[in-house]
Image: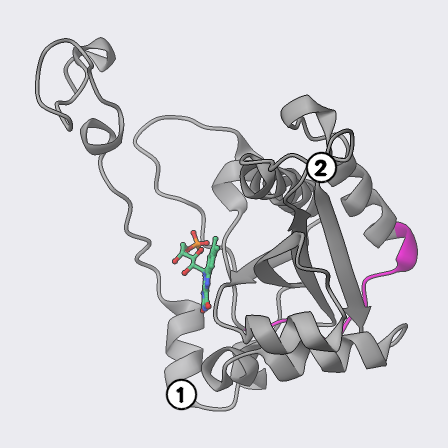
Amino acid sequence: MRKPAETELEIHELLKQRWSPLAFAETPVTPATLRRLFEAARWTPSSYNEQPWRFIVGTKEGDPETYGKIRDTLVPSNQSWAQTAPVLILGVARTTFSHNDAPNSAALYDLGQAVANLTLQASELDLLIHQMGGYDRDGARAAFEIPDTYALAAVLALGYEGDPSRLADEKLQARHSEPVRPRRPLPEIVLSGDGGAFGTPSPLLGPP
Ligand SMILES: Cc1cc2nc3c(=O)[nH]c(=O)nc-3n(C[C@H](O)[C@H](O)[C@H](O)COP(=O)(O)O)c2cc1C
């Protein structure tokens, strides 16, 4: 199924078609396709061109051990659906600059941009991604021996969209098929700095 964003104005088709499914198809994602996704992430801009992102990736077919370790860190409510995905990815960011070891306050910001690029490339290849913050960070750090100089961000479930009947119960199936996708209105997120209190909508967008 498709769940195109009901936008107020035209936006790029790839942005419109992206959504976070719960049910994924069994169809594996080939190594060549995975490479393309990470190539998209690689070309993301970053502070000092540090490229702080690192992706720990597991697939059911190619690297079931890594896949299983990531899956086991997920909170049960995420594990229940995410295990339908053929690929799980843990995104982490190096929080110090490699040229002087000073703190890099942009590390997570940069990783987020890299994931956004990866997600749009996935969209072009008819793949979908569902990100998750609900997982055991300490458990993941221990399982993958991630140094303290790396911050753990989100786990990504990746794959082709699947039939909701693959999900364990009706509640999950209903969530997968829920058509409403709430978004804040533009005046709440685009603000003016011209004298008013923080939160004043910008007049630059004009009348709706
Ligand atoms: C950093 C991050 C963490 C998230 N954590 C979870 C999660 O733990 N479980 C979940 O079901 N969805 C999670 N989501 C998915 C969001 O709920 C989803 O993106 C949002 O509701 C908008 O829906 P859409 O992606 O279909 O537009 C997360 C998304 C992001 C970006």
Which residue position is annotated with label 2?
101
Q: For residue 163: magenta?
A: no
**Above or below, 36 relative to 152:** above
x and y percent of residue 48 in the render? 69, 23
x and y percent of residue 59 in the render? 81, 71
For the record, the magenta segment spans: 23-32
Residue type for callout 2: Asp
Q: In this view of the protein, which residue sits in the foreground, 6 or 80? A: 80
Q: Residue at x 54, y 38 (%)?
A: 109
The secondary element bearing badge 2 is classed as loop
Choose top left, top right, bottom left or bottom right for residue 40. top right
Q: Give the side of residue 91 with respect to residue 202, left or right.
A: right
Q: Residue at x 78, y 29 (%)?
A: 99
Choose top left, top right, bottom left or bottom right for residue 51. top right
How would you classify the magenta stretch by its main secondary structure?
loop
The secondary element bearing badge 1 is classed as helix
Point out the quarter of the image occupied by ligand 1: bottom left
Q: In this view of the protein, which residue sits in the foreground, 152 or 105? A: 105
**Above or below, 60 relative to 179:** below
Residue type for callout 1: Glu
